[in-house]
Image (cartoon, rainbow, N blue to C red):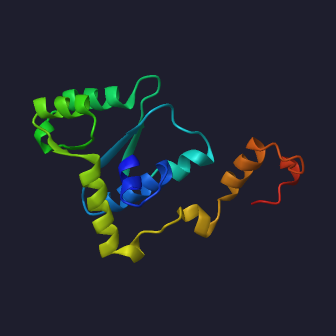
Amino acid sequence: MYALRDVGLEVGRGGLCRLLGKFASSGQKVRVVFDGTPPYGPLASQIQDDRIDVKYSAGRTADDVIIESIAADSAPRRLTLVSTDHEIRDAARKRKCKLKTSEEFAKALVRMLEESPKTLPSEPPEKRVGLTPEQTRAWLKELNVEEYDEKEDPLP
């Protein structure tokens, strides 16, 4: 996300996943590892993209999860690792993975966007089409909206 900011794209986790999903639609398999635990409820659906594998470090660092994944992979030479972290890059070099810096990958993503700007929405799909009734109920409950009465639920 920092490397994307340097090339003019300010994105959070959801935006990064949408960009990676677009990249994955070109036939690439993509995994992204975030620090921490996964969000819950409607927030999780904003980050999830069926075209990519989203992982969370849950009590460890994302770097540790990535290094363990590199060590456990049965075909590491087929992996392309995107990171600027020296420890991760060293682990990838030892297993003969292909390497790209975050900056190189960010520039490639920008080029991809410039080639087909109309195919990548700048907003999450939920913003254009709205939330499902289940997501709306979950948010109303999460926000403790007083007027919300599940027995008189106007939503289908």
- Seen as rendered, the residue at the extreme front is 6
Task: Locate residue 60, reporting x and y percent.
Answer: 42, 23
Residue ID at (77%, 49%): 140
Residue ID at (30%, 49%): 30
Tell me if I can see residue 1 in this picture.
no
136 lies left or right of 54: right
Task: Locate residue 113, reporting x and y percent.
Answer: 34, 69
Could you say which is closer to the camera, residue 116 or residue 7?
Answer: 7
Q: How many marks?
A: 0
Could you say which is closer to the camera, residue 12 or residue 17?
Answer: 12
Quarter in which the C terminus is drawn: bottom right
Could you say which is closer to the camera, residue 57 or residue 106?
Answer: 106
From what the image shows, is residue 46 above or below residue 99? below
92 lies left or right of 132: left
From what the image shows, is residue 114 above or below residue 86? below
Residue ID at (53%, 61%): 124
Task: Locate residue 116, reporting x and y percent.
Answer: 33, 75
Tell me if I can see residue 68 in this picture.
yes
Task: Locate residue 47, reporting x and y percent.
Answer: 50, 49
Quarter-wise, where is residue 20 in the image?
A: bottom left
- Seen as rendered, the residue at the extreme top is 59
Quarter-wise, where is residue 128 in the image?
A: bottom right
From what the image shows, is residue 43 above or below residue 23? above
